[in-house]
Amino acid sequence: GKAGWRNEYRDIPNNGGVECGISIKIGSEWVTKWDAAENTQVEAVKGGRSGAMKRAAVQWGIGRYLYNLEEGFAQISSDKKQGWHRAKLKDGTGFYWLPPSLPDWAMPASCNQPSPENTNQKSPSVDCEQILKDFSDYAATETDKKKLIERYQHDWQLLDGHDDAQTKCVQVMNIRINELKQVA
């Protein structure tokens, strides 16, 4: 596969869902980590495979942030719009669609860099340590996941341009989300 990795799927018998294995080639050996998911209510097979792959990715230590995303839906239109994608239904009916956007905190750092026209502006002084301390204190006691995500997004944006501080903010968030999942 691309960049020395591949994925494969195995159906679990008796409508048990699907397993996904993500393999990475290390030297001459393929190392695989597996996880499974049930088929979903909407597009059962596709949803099950997607869920299993997401879970298998987490086994490799990647993609955990996907669990923090709110559900998003594509916008559709019968009218052609600039930047929208064209698609057809099985019956041949054409339409245009726009995928849901990801929040800034879920985008790769390269997507969040300031545009060249804004690079001459000086950013206000930011006390990264205080922001991180305040967020850590808040996260330690907040049990409402939605409020926690909102505060995380806000503080992550305050740390814009300070990659190390943003990384620490992500780590605090991941630790707290894992704690909340264990309690649930």
Image (tube, rainbow, N blue to C red):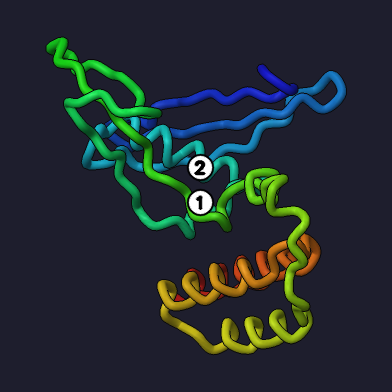
| Residue drawn at x 66%, y 65% as measured from the top left | 170
Position of 125 relative to 111 (above/below): below
Q: Residue at 77% across / 78% down in the picture? A: 125
Alpha carbon distance from label 1 to label 2: 8 Å
Q: What residue type is disc 1 on?
A: Leu
> Which residue is outermost to the top?
92
Residue 54: which numbered mark, if any? 2
Report the residue marked by disc 1. Answer: 66
Q: Which residue type carries mark 2?
A: Lys
Quadrant in which the C terminus appears: bottom left
**Helix, strand or loop under label 1:** helix
**Residue in the picture at 48% in, 25% down:** 9
Residue 83 image position (x, y, % from top left): 40, 28
* Location of residue 26 (image quadrant): top right
Few, some or many residues within 10 Å of mark 2 (<14, 14–19, 20+): many
Q: Position of residue 167 (x, y in %)?
A: 73, 63
